[in-house]
Image (cartoon, rainbow, N blue to C red):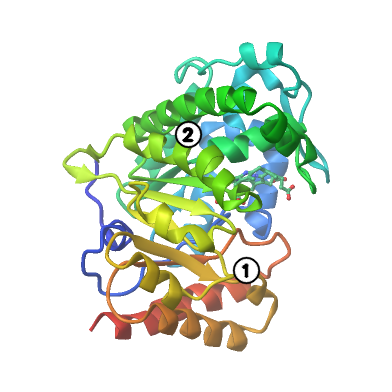
Amino acid sequence: MAELQNDRFLRALLKEPVDRTPVWMMRQAGRYLPEYRATRAKAGSFMDLCKNAELACEVTIQPLDRYPLDAAILFSDILTIPDAMGLELRFAEGEGPIFDKPIKTQADVDRLFVPDMGSDLGYVMNAVSTIRKELNGRVPLIGFSGSPWTLATYMVEGGSSKQFGKVKGMMFEQPKMMHQILDVLADSVTAYLNAQIEAGAQAVQIFDTWGGLLTPRDYKAFSLDYMAKIVDGLIKEKDGRKVPCILYTKGGGQWLNAMADAGADCLGIDWTMDMADARAQVGDRVALQGNMDPTVLYASPERVRQEVKSVLDSYGKGTGHVFNLGHGIHPGIDPETVDAFINAVVDYSPEYHK
Ligand code: CP3
């Protein structure tokens, strides 16, 4: 395996000194890039793209060829696990994900199983090893999964949701059934992330996109405790190097203290809090990733550069910061504005590490 040429992302996650703040973007391979749209058209459906290792590799690398990013992220989706459990995922044009067989009854829950990482999800591992080979040590590769709670929202709602009435109704009325779903998901996510690490992922991120919908009590019981169990079961070291884990709960700012004790190396922060406050709360326990408001990218390159400076100032001096957006980049953003964003991090951040 080729030696890693740029390890500042892995170093910052472990709070080791770096020359500048590393940067990558959630959803960095996606529809805002014309070259992504071209490959996607060639592949057919979104899931066809995920299942084609060569094309998934191609779109993973596209943003790296444009911008000086410090990490690549596997091109896939969080909904691969429920799809492999037989819920029959499809993406309807303009509507987002749909499960044709959502979970409604106890019998549906009893049918859930931990998918086989070779036969059911082997296409994801193929994509990981193909990308890792193609990167040839250029930057580290991030693997990822959804959190059990976030996956459960799609599985019970049958797709995206605005009110989350079905899944939250089930949580309040049939908590045992909900815990049964979350248990099999936690075992699946642990096996899934470990298989990605075995296939070549050098860091992993858990996306808890919908944990912020919960009360503090329910966040702990239905989301955080399961993520802590997953982190506990992860492979910690591979080929003589630590494999750091990032925990991202959108809307989780008020729970950083509890999240910092879940065992992860880094917490992803959305834009609704200042990095300075986040850092004060977590202290030396974990690194932080974030947190520029993704809608700043609708403004001018000049305004974007100011905002980059503001986020760097808020975190302050020293290691332990991975620059990112507070959530995924929107499909309508101009790639030129992204260029201003990434290069501003490269230009301004060395100051903070002297
Ligand atoms: O960050 C990356 O570049 C890696 C790829 C990635 C995708 N999805 C590609 C994708 C990652 C990390 C995800 C995670 C994901 N998927 C999450 C959690 C992350 C978050 O944003 O908090 C969620 C909730 C999903 C579920 C999902 N997948 C939805 C709701 C949609 C529809 C979105 C839409 O606007 O249509 C997807 C599809 C999807 N996943 C796309 C991409 C690039 C768009 C598909 C297309 O090309 O049409």
First-in-chain label (1 vs 2): 2
In the displayed structure image, the side of residue 166 where residue 8 appears, left or right: left
Q: Which quadrant of the figure contains the C terminus?
A: bottom left
Provide the residue designation for mark 2. 127
Q: Whole-Å distance between the Cαs marked 1 and 2?
A: 27 Å
Q: Report the residue at 74% width, 17% height from top.
A: 105
Is 301 located above or below residue 293 in the figure? below
The picture quadrant where one finds residue 80 is top right
Q: Report the residue at 55% width, 57% height from top.
A: 28
Provide the residue designation for mark 1. 294
Is 320 located above or below residue 187 in the figure? below
Q: Are marks 1 and 2 in contact (CB under 8 Å)?
A: no
Q: Amino acid at mark 2?
A: Ala
Q: Amino acid at mark 1?
A: Pro
Q: Report the residue at 41% width, 34% height from top.
A: 193
Percent across and percent down for residue 256 are 45, 60
Percent across and percent down for residue 95 are 82, 43
